[in-house]
Image: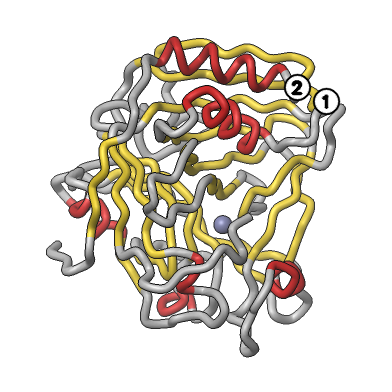
């Protein structure tokens, strides 16, 4: 699939997995009571609870930051629609595994929604495994709904971790009982940022919230009035407390090399129909996290908005 979208391919700092594991363990220990981080052979992530579209996170690991929040705020640009097959091509991984967080396809679903991307492309397109999930706000009563939708389309923005989806060495990061103020995701990112400073280290993959509950949001229909500050965005979003086991997919980066990046972004899905955008757990005493991550070699900045701002980046 050809594409005319502008793409910047930027090499990232790639430390050894063992070094990253030490850095993450130190960081997590400041925020969780029980922590273990190791370099392991990636378990088969197609199996429960993760149920990724491919077994592993290895082979040409890279990140993609597509579009951005400025496509949504202050007012949504409904012309900003993308396709995962197009992304795989731009990422030079036409048969890659793409997992991560983005906005669902407004033009397909008929409403603004959340996407937890989880797709492995194959040369024979009938064999492509698409386990992507979409979630929307029920306009009737503002409860949340998982959409019955199989699509490779999305809108506005996405933050993706991409690889050949092969087995290999990855980082396993287990953290139980939160003792500090940071979410698991933010704690991992800050640990990298504190250690690697201005060297950008990108990491992505998946983590499970195995016990406890978490605060997630789902975007409702596009706002008809401009959202001009974080408070406006906060009032517009719909927040829910959802229950483990919840699976999160996405990516984070320790430092933005002036590419107008989203620094961390994970979206969730589950076997019980709950999902959305991960903020943090709400049950520090019982929460348990288990994540599998790989370090990215490149950041692909795709269709960077021409005008930007820092509103709504949480
Ligand atoms: Zn999100």
Q: Residue at x 49, y 36 (%)?
A: 254
Give coordinates of residue 76: x percent, y percent: 50, 80
Give coordinates of residue 232: x percent, y percent: 72, 75
Left or right of 161: which side holds 187?
right
Q: Is mark 1 within 8 Å of ligand 1?
A: no
User: Does residue 124 appear in the picture of this structure?
Assistant: yes
Left or right of 58: which side holds 43?
right
In the rendered image, which quarter is residue 140 located in?
bottom right
Please tell me whether residue 279 is drawn above or below residue 194 in the rendered image: below
Q: Which residue occupies the foreground of this view, 77 or 165?
A: 77
Q: Quadrant of ligand 1?
A: bottom right
Q: How many marks?
A: 2
Q: From this viewpoint, which residue is outermost toward the bottom? A: 224
Q: Residue at x 32, y 43 (%)?
A: 299
Please give the residue where the numbered disc 1 appears in the rendered image: 179
Q: Which residue occupies the foreground of this view, 216 or 109?
A: 216
Please give the residue where the numbered disc 2 appears in the rendered image: 32
> Could you tell me if the residues under marks 1 and 2 are in contact, i.e. CB atoms within 8 Å?
yes
Q: Residue at x 22, y 64 (%)?
A: 6
Q: Which residue occupies the foreground of this view, 306 or 116?
A: 306
User: Does residue 276 appear in the picture of this structure?
Assistant: no
């Amino acid at each position: 699939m050809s594409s005319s979208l502008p793409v910047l391919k930027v090499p990232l700092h790639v430390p050894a997995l063992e070094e990253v594991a030490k850095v993450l363990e130190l960081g997590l220990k400041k925020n969780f009571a029980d922590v273990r981080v190791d370099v392991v052979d990636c378990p088969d992530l197609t199996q429960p609870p993760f149920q990724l579209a491919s077994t592993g996170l290895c082979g040409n690991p890279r990140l993609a930051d597509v579009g951005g929040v400025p496509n949504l705020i202050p007012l949504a640009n409904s012309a900003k629609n993308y396709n995962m097959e197009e992304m795989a091509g731009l990422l030079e991984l036409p048969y890659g595994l793409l997992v991560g967080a983005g906005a669902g396809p407004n033009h397909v679903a008929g409403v603004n929604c959340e996407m937890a991307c989880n797709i492995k492309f194959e040369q024979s397109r009938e064999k492509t495994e698409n386990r992507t999930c979409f979630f929307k706000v029920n306009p009737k009563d503002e409860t949340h709904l998982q959409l019955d939708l199989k699509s490779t389309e999305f809108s506005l923005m996405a933050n993706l971790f991409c690889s050949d989806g092969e087995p290999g060495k990855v980082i396993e990061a287990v953290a139980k009982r939160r003792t500090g103020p940071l979410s698991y995701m933010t704690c991992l990112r800050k640990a990298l940022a504190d250690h690697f400073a201005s060297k950008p280290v990108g990491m992505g993959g998946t983590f499970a919230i195995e016990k406890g509950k978490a605060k997630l949001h789902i975007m409702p229909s596009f706002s008809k009035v401009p959202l001009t500050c974080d408070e406006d965005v906060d009032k517009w979003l719909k927040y829910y407390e959802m229950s483990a086991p919840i699976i999160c997919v996405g990516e984070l980066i320790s430092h933005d090399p002036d590419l107008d990046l989203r620094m961390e972004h994970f979206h969730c899905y589950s076997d019980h129909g709950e999902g959305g955008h991960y903020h943090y757990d709400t049950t520090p005493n019982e929460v348990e996290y288990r994540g599998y991550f790989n370090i990215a070699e490149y950041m692909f900045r795709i269709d960077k908005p021409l005008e930007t701002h820092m509103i709504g980046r949480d």
